[in-house]
Image: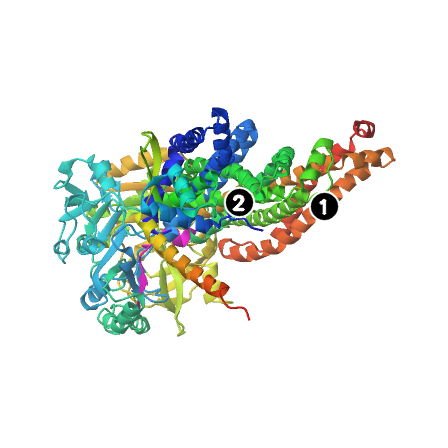
Amino acid sequence: MSRPADLVQGTLDLLLLKILALQPQHGWAISQRLKQVSGDVLQVSDGSLYPSLHKLEQQGWIKAEWKPSENNRKAKFYSLTRLGRRHLEREAADWARLSSAISLVVQLPEA
Amino acid sequence: MSFGRWWYVLPLRLRSLFRRNAVEQELDDELRYHVERQIEVNLARGMTPSAARTAALSAMGSLEARKDECRDHRGVSLVDHTLRDLRHAIRLLRRSPVFTAVAIASLALGIGANAAFFQLIDHVHLRSLGVRSPQELAEVKVAGVRNFGVSDGFNSEITYPLWEQIRAHQQAFSGVFAWGRFNPLVGRGADARQVSALWASGDFFSVLGVQPARGRLLMSADDHRGCGATSVVVSHAFWQRYFGGRESAVGSPLVVLDQRFTVIGVTPPDFTGLEVGRTFDIVLPVCAAALWGTALDQKHYWWLTVMGRLEPGWDVETASDHVRTLSPALFEATVPSGYSAESTARYREFRLGVWSAARGVSFLREEYGRPLWLLFGMTGLVLLITCGNLATLMLARSRERAAEISVRVALGASRARIVSQLSLESLVVAVIGAVASVPVALAAGRGLVRFLSTSANPVYLELTGDWRVGAFSTAVALCTAVAFGVAPALRLSLTNPQDALRRASRGVAGLDSRSLLRRVLVVGQIAVSVLLVSSALVFARSVWNLANVKMGFQQDGILSIQFLDLLSAKVPPDERALFQQQLADEVRATPGVIAAAPSTHTPLNGASWSQAFRLIDTEGRRSSKFSYVGPDYFTTMEVALVAGRGIRTSDTASSQRVIVVNDAFVRTMLPGQDPLGQTLRTFAEPGYPETTYEIVGVVGDTMYATLRGGTPPIAFVPIAQHPNLRPWANVLARTNGSTAAITTALTQRIATLNPAITVKVGELRGQIRELITGDRLLAWLAGTMSALATALAAVGVYGLVAYLATLRRKEIGIRLSLGSSRGSVIGLMMRESGWLVGLGVAVGLPLAWLAMRGVAALVFGVSSAEAMPALAALLLAVVAGVSAGIPAWRASRLDPVSILRAD
């Protein structure tokens, strides 16, 4: 059973934080960016993006601001807070450790 | 959550709560922006407008569901739900105004009564004095039973010479002070009034840290031997009352007991002294006592309380050790003269100790401490029963809502949600009840204080609801909400939706667990009622005993007349006896007075005078009460003369010393002997040299100082033979006219004799009645509460039987139609409640017996305390029988045909 879209919640949070670390974005732009960077491997439905963003906002990792967007309409821009940046560093380091460990295990030669 | 996160999160949460519409609008805008951008992209890809829109929307999934998910992350859904439930609860309560009113009123009264007692207990027992760092204050007094010399009422623990020694030698305190109480006359002649005064040593105010409201307070410079009539400090209340709050009061003169003092300052309004339950009007430097006598030099006159502020690093134990070590030297330096060798040896053995004085001293605490806790417990129990009945009411209500609840359970509402919703309803009732209880508590508290306040012991307590009472009421309200709301709510939430729906539609029910809860409540109510009723019975019995104590003298129509301020009348000491007799003659000559006699002792006013003596030709040291009375004393008081003669006018200072003793004296001192003609010799005491008396008469036993004290041995000495009369006089008079008229006439007579003398008239019967104020209060309140408890229990039993009767309607119908007699139906219904009442009694009786043991110290002369619980149980069985009988009888009158046809 292969369900690449069925992302672990924590993974999506990490992705969102990383994208916002590059630059403040509004929801639509984040969804485009997600599709772009992860290709079709990670399919995040447009709908599930917003509850995740709201959760991150309520946790204090990101903050929101209404600003004119590239098409000159007001959009809600999210950006990383200081806490969020620290959180991202920790999570990214954890992720790197975990993934390298897993790939080590997966690459063990079979006897 | 860390503080840093709250920095970001808190504004968001607050915004979600209070700017709900704006937040919703933003959520809407945000999602719409996304959809619109997606539509634009889709259009650019060449889709038709409607296809572009459909595709964009379907990519989002259900928009409303997404919004809900977003809302869930706001972390305020709990608050949101609660607010919604709250509105629902209030709506439901408004729909049944009678239930709501009954519930709120009973809770307001119940919580109010509890809070009132809590407030009293808090003031009398718990709270510290309202001065700087009260926990550092400690009192120095003689450890153990002193019983030596002359004491001046409550908390008279130290003599002046001893105080000087303590002040000079102690090192445990950073500051010490002495204070005492007396009730002098202020003003002159007709304007004179008795006030409550404090003696205070120079450091009194500075050690306590009290700052003046006006002028200055007493300082150490004001207090030195030979200070004369100089400075007086007045209380804020007295300043307002006597001086009308005028600024010019400071510096103006104040006449105290014929001495002219100058007001130097006013104490702050929140300082009411160191005795909880009493306040003061004026404060005099303790050195001023020398103006009216020799109190400063009397080594046997205990009239002061010594307190101090402990040095840093010292506590009560170390300070106690310290003063104990000092004691031998201190007492050696202050040995009173004029006592026998045995007495002075005993004096040298005294040791001082230190006790915490953080809560001050309190006559009220010692007198009413235990009754207050007891009444507090009783009101708590009544509140508990009230909660039981409210729980039953809630259950009855929820039965009506069972269908609604089962629909909601069937639709998937969580149990927690249902419980919280139902509990909220009771919480609303409890909170409103608690708020309404505040005025009840204040009024009840003030009522209690007024009840306890007597002319002999006025009680002063400033009861203004504060946060402590508020916190208490809130806590009680929450507990009651749990007691009467949450339990039924939990019970109800267990309802099997299918059962409930079926039952609701058919109107039939089995014996479900809900009536089990009601049964438990009834058992509990009966048990508590047995406990309360037996206490009420025993207290009522005790009051009856106290009110009917055999006095041995006539108390009706007896007036106790005090002549104050004889000092200003300037009567030389050796003419005082004559002067007293003259005053008694004035009293006797007043219309309406039948007989009058001077006496050093007024029966049952709490004062006591004992002297030690030995019978001639024996060595044993014995002690008896000594009263000095005028010739007509026994006829005035109608004390029976048993043998020999009474006191005669011919018994004078120059004639043979004689005494008349009472029966108790003969029984204990001279058993089986003829007392007449026997002689006894007193031991010397200061002012009372050794004297030999011959017993010339025997009178009947009379009550002496207190109602509970019984009839001790008393020796009556002719007042003319008193070695050392004090400058005041007390005359007892038997009258047959109105007290007011006699008082007016007598005051006029005395004014023509000497205008400086003030007359104070009291009715002996009223004064004796006031002695049992606390007992009467206890009996009244216990009676009221047990009546309430019984009524509530009766309602509980009635409700249960009526409820069971509705449940078993059909069964009763069948039984009746099959030929059961109506009597057997009544029996059927009564049997069940009979068991419950029996169980309640079985639980209540042992509790009540335990309680009887607990209250034994508070009651007087109740020999049958053990029988009271049984009597209470019987009473409750009758009440419960009647309350069960009414609905049972009604059930038996049902028409079987109509019952069976109805189904």
Q: How is the image coloured?
A: rainbow
B872 to the left or right of B266 = right
| Magenta extent | B352-368
Residue B763, quarter of picture: top left
Which numbered mark, 2 or 1, is in the foreground of this view?
A: 2
Residue B188, quarter of picture: top left
Q: In the structure shown, which secondary structural element does the residue marked by tag 1 occupy?
A: helix
Front residue of this view, candidates B706 and B536: B536
B194 to the left or right of A95 = left
* Residue at the (38%, 64%) spot, across then down: B694
B269 to the left or right of B463 = left
Q: In the structure shown, which secondary structural element does the residue marked by tag 2 occupy?
A: helix
Front residue of this view, candidates B847 and B155: B847
Mark 2 — on which chain does it sit?
A: B
Pointer 1 residue: B834
The kind of residue on which mark 1 rests is: Gly
Q: Is residue B63 above or below residue B732?
A: above
